[in-house]
Amino acid sequence: MRKFLSRLCFCVLLTSCNALVTYSDQLVDESTGRSSFVTKPASLGGIVGFIVGIPLDIVTLPVTYFIYISQKEEDEEGLDSLSTLLFPSFFLWRGGVVLIGAPADFLEFIFYRGWVKASSKKSLGIIENL
């Protein structure tokens, strides 16, 4: 079991951050065709992850503040201070969404969304470009 978890963690590390952020955004958005069976637990996982990350924010504040200051000197326009200073909370927020929402999304896809015809998806507004 330990070997499986280490391989799973390695595979997650190989994925792109942008893909994980996009997927976590889709898990909490009902307009993507996901039902409340997926979106509500995923949102709850995100809230719990963010709350767990707050003490880590306090502990890592000297490091994240130094990173924020060094980034501020280089680029004033595109800098978001909250995402830099609260990095542990944002990371655990996304992690909580994916950790709770992905299994529910998998089950919903296997038992529901995978079986719905494209014509009914279009009438539900899930597929816009058919």
Image (cartoon, rainbow, N blue to C red):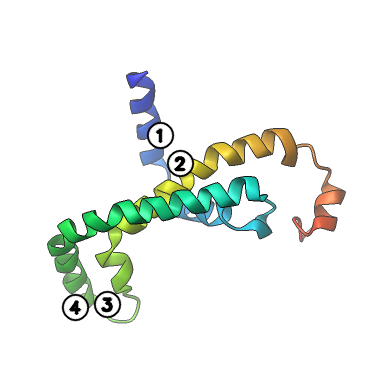
Q: Sequence order check: which comes first, mark 1 or mark 3?
A: 1
Q: Which residue is mark 2?
A: 99
Q: Sequence order check: which comes first, mark 3 or mark 2?
A: 3
- Taking 109 as reference, is 28 left or right? left
Q: Residue at x 43, y 55 (%)?
A: 47
Q: Which residue is mark 1?
A: 11
Q: Residues within 10 Å of mark 1 (few under 14, many from 20)?
A: few
User: Tag 4's secondary structure?
Assistant: helix
Q: Which residue is mark 4?
A: 73
Q: Position of residue 3 (x, y in %)?
A: 34, 20
Q: 33 or 76, which is in the foreground?
A: 33
Q: Which residue is mark 3?
A: 75
Q: Position of residue 130 (x, y in %)?
A: 81, 56
In contact (CB < 8 Å): disc 1 and disc 4 = no
User: Tag 1's secondary structure?
Assistant: helix
Q: Sequence order check: which comes first, mark 2 or mark 4?
A: 4
Q: Amino acid at mark 2?
A: Leu
- Taking 86 as reference, is 30 left or right? right
Q: Amino acid at mark 1?
A: Cys
Question: In this orientation, does residue 115 appear?
Answer: yes
Quarter-wise, where is residue 77 in the image?
bottom left
Q: Residue at x 40, y 38 (%)?
A: 12
Measured Cα–Cα span from mark 2 to mark 4: 36 Å
In contact (CB < 8 Å): disc 1 and disc 3 = no
Q: Residue at x 57, y 54 (%)?
A: 26
